């Protein structure tokens, strides 16, 4: 039990004992922001292509005069009643 409290105390004091460098912190913050912005730009550039694929499937179904909006087997079903 004492060891756990000792480790927790060291952990709490470690953050205050390390000097913070303003330029390094700002650079890390800037690089992290740019990384997230780049990821968002890449994701946004791929988004219209995915929508275009679904739009092409729906357009093909509408051209065939099907009432469903997704590609399904629209063949004749089995007659289950005698």
Image (cartoon, rainbow, N blue to C red):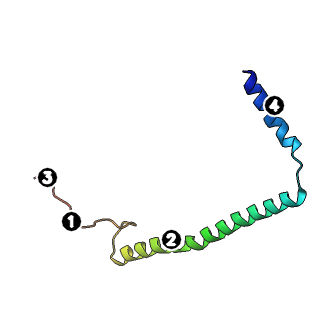
Labels 3 and 4: the sequence-earlier one: 4
Q: Which of marks 1 and 3 is in front?
A: 1
Q: Which of 73/18 is in front?
A: 18
Q: Residue furthest top?
A: 1
Q: Are marks 4 and 1 in contact (CB under 8 Å)?
A: no
User: From mark 2 to mark 1, how far is it between C-alphas?
Assistant: 31 Å
Q: Which of 36/65 is in front?
A: 36
Q: Is residue 32 above or below residue 62?
A: above
SS for callout 2: helix
Q: In this view, does 23 lie above or below 61?
A: above
Q: How crowded is mark 2: few (under 14 residues within 10 Å), some or many (20 or more)?
A: few
Name the residue carrying label 3: 81
**Mark number displayed over residue 9:** 4
- Residue shown at the point (86%, 46%) measured from the top left: 18
Image quarter where the N terminus lies is: top right
Q: Residues within 10 Å of mark 3 (few under 14, many from 20)?
A: few
């Amino acid at each position: 039990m004492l060891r756990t409290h000792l480790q927790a105390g060291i952990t709490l004091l470690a953050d205050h004992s390390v000097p913070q460098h303003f330029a390094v912190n700002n650079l890390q913050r800037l690089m992290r922001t740019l990384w997230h912005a780049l990821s968002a730009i890449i994701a946004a550039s791929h988004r219209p292509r995915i929508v275009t694929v679904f739009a092409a499937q729906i357009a093909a179904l509408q051209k065939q005069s099907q009432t469903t909006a997704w590609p399904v087997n629209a063949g004749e079903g089995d007659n289950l009643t005698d």
